[in-house]
Amino acid sequence: MCRFICSHKKNVLMDPSEVEFLSEKETVTIIPNFSLDKIYLIGGDLGPFNPGLPVDVPVWLALNLKQRQKCRIVPPDWMDVVKLEQIRDQERKEETFAPIPSPYYMELTKLLLNHASDNIPKADEIRTLVKDIWDTRVAKLRLSADSFISLQEAHAKLDNLTLMEINTTRMFLLDSLNCMYKLRSNMQPGSGATRSQDY
Amino acid sequence: MDVQSYMPVQPGVGMEENFLSLDDILLSQERLPCRTETTFPRLGFLEKSSDTRDIPEGSKMEMPLWLAKGLYERKRRVLSVELPKVYREGWRTVFSADPTVVDLHKMGPYYYGLGSQLLHFQNPENPEIAQAVLQTFIGRFRRTMDSAQNAYNEDTSALVEPLDSLERALFRVGQGGLNAFQRWETGSASRLTASSLVLNYRKRKITDLQD
């Protein structure tokens, strides 16, 4: 009767630092203060680097160069107080998730502000704004998760959600939905009642 | 990070139990009020309240779930299982009024599991029980979620106390997500720490082994 049910589910939450790692692939513009020929990497060619000429590089390289004081980072154009205020207001106004300028806005804000806050004007305001946007969105996520459960819906559309946002609630939501599914399948009569007799 | 030396098996929750789940093993010890429908010959010693040799037909006794499930048969009526009071009509109305006020841990820490297991016994109220258990879960979900995702760096014992063991597991999972995010946000995730295995490692002395 007690069939051995192989538990496929590994209880692994993707660690936020892994999400951050993924975000480091995004490109950002830097202004180098050294010159170097094009460098050829598996992920693509970077450079050439000339002093004073802006060039697009992945975030991981930008941060590395910045830490060695070899460049100045140009903040992405959404990382701006006016634009972020607009996004925040739209986010508060709408019931669904508003489009977000970067799928890694939270991670990039943290990385860039922590390592290159001297290159970003009004860093503190930006930090607060991004945190506001995050809080609004997470509150929305929780609200929609609750209505998803209480209305017993079968599917949901999660447009404009970022990986980090999904990641904070993924395990909890999946486990809850699993429980709910099992409790709901109890209501189908005869699903397990006959099996308990087969000794 | 929360590292465990083994992977705990999740409880089966539904009508099927998970054989290796510790929660389901504990659940099978839950007592159910039963009524015998036949005479159990020479088993009177099990019933401490009477001195008879047999357990007579129609006597009421409590049985653990595993025994009741084993003895219960639809065709040969050996015993009938009555509902524990949390699953009866009276309590079901309480749950449908406001599921969040009930202390499910006190009402039997395996409310959902036992409720599902009760469906094995052909009770006429089965559909209502299944419905009540599901609605209770849905009704309490918001509170479980909110407390799991808001309580950061505080004592959670008061929040956890009224939760069923299933909800407690969910609460822990939710806390895991929140804590991981907070650790990342405050920057402590990037700091390397010694593994708890290394910290707790002590050389075993030969004298300890010889005891």
Image (cartoon, coloured by chain):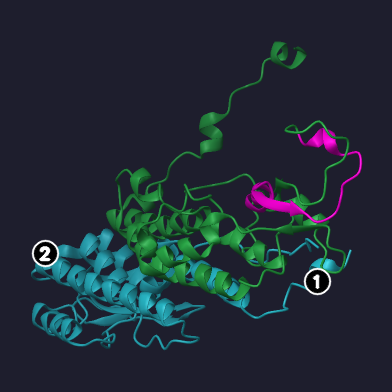
Chain colours: A cyan, B green
Picture layout, residue A27 above or below residue B151: below
User: In the image, B9: left or right of B103?
Assistant: right
Q: Nearer the viewer, residue A158 or B78?
A: B78
Q: Are marks 1 and 2 on the same chain?
A: yes
Reply yes or no: does residue B180 show up in magenta.
no
Residue at the image point whose x is 55% and y is 68% from the top = A179
Q: Nearer the viewer, residue B141 or B124?
A: B124
Q: Residues within 10 Å of mark 2 (few under 14, many from 20)?
A: few
Q: Which residue is mark 2?
A: A124
Residue at the image point whose x is 37% and y is 47% from the top = B191
Residue B141's disc is: none
Residue B204, by quadrant, is: top right
Name the spot of residue A30 as percent of width and height, x first: 24, 76
> Amino acid under label 1?
Arg
Name the spot of residue A188 as percent of width and height, x first: 65, 81
Residue A195's disc is: 1
- The residues tagged by marks 1 and 2 sit, at their Cα atoms, a distance apart of 63 Å
* Residue A75 visible in the picture: yes
Reply yes or no: does residue B30 show up in magenta.
yes
> Amino acid under label 2?
Asp
Residue at the image point whose x is 71% and y is 10% from the top = B207
Residue found at the very far right of the displayed protein: B41
User: In the image, A199: left or right of A16?
Assistant: right
Q: Which residues are magenta?
A: B23-47
Mark in front: 1 vs 2: 1
Picture layout, residue B44 above or below residue A44: above
